[in-house]
């Protein structure tokens, strides 16, 4: 190899297949922190304090992700997945309780968040109708609520079909 006009020899180790392997130098945590790319922080919580602290951080992250999915300019909707994507989250080798409970918590928090969306067939939709009733002083008609439930179910089924079709087609994933 030639550097600054002089030839240098580099000792390399060949693999069994005769290939030379290189990997990028990974900066240490201290270097990442110095560059402002990573910040290590230790926070201590009691047993009951840990539940809202973890859930609020996760929920805030999920809301930000959901906003990106809704915004067509980001293209994040192409990464939306269905049952196949949910199944692929679990590791293929061995059983790991920590991974299992982390995934279970992830699904629980995501389902709770999704249930609060203001779609008529979900709890968030019922909250919207209740708030309307509180503000206006009158209940929406039963026929209106029935049609709203039907529209809500159609929206949910369309989302379900879209997410699972995304898994099959692989839209945006290079498959």
Image: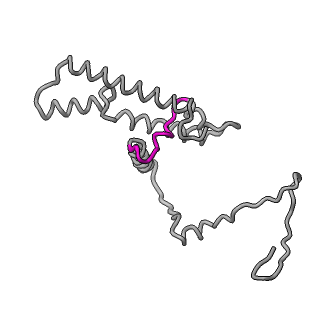
Could you tell me residue 38's position as x and y percent? 53, 64
Up the image or down, 139 lies above or below 67; here it is above
Residue 171 visible in the displayed image: yes
Secondary structure mostly seen in magenta is helix
Could you tell me residue 30's position as x and y percent? 59, 69
Answer with left or right where residue 133 lies relative to residue 153.
left
Q: Nearer the viewer, residue 98 or 39?
A: 39
Q: Residue at x 39, y 27 (%)?
A: 156
Q: Is residue 35 magenta?
A: no
Residue 48 visible in the displayed image: no
Q: Residue at x 32, y 25 (%)?
A: 152
Q: Nearer the viewer, residue 152 or 142?
A: 152
Q: In this picture, which residue range is highlighted in magenta?
A: 71-83
Colour scheme in the image? Answer: one colour
Q: Is residue 76 magenta?
A: yes
Up the image or down, 72 lies above or below 143; here it is below
Which of the 4 image quarters holds residue 3?
Answer: bottom right
Answer with left or right where residue 158 lies relative to residue 142.
right
């Amino acid at each position: 190899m030639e550097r600054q006009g002089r030839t240098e020899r580099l000792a390399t180790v060949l693999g069994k297949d005769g290939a030379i392997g290189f990997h990028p130098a990974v900066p240490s945590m201290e270097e990442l922190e110095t560059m402002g790319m990573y910040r290590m922080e230790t926070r201590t919580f009691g047993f009951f304090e840990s539940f809202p602290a973890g859930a609020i951080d996760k929920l805030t992250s999920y809301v930000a992700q959901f906003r990106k999915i809704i915004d067509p300019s980001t293209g994040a909707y192409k990464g939306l997945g269905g049952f196949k994507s949910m199944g692929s989250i679990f590791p293929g080798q061995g059983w790991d309780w920590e991974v299992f409970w982390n995934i279970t918590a992830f699904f629980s928090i995501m389902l709770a968040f999704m249930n609060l969306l203001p779609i008529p067939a979900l709890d968030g939709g019922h909250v919207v109708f209740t708030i309307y009733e509180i503000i206006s002083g009158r209940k929406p008609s039963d026929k209106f609520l029935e049609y709203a439930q039907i529209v809500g179910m159609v929206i949910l089924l369309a989302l379900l079909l879209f997410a699972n079709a995304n898994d099959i087609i692989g839209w945006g994933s290079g498959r």
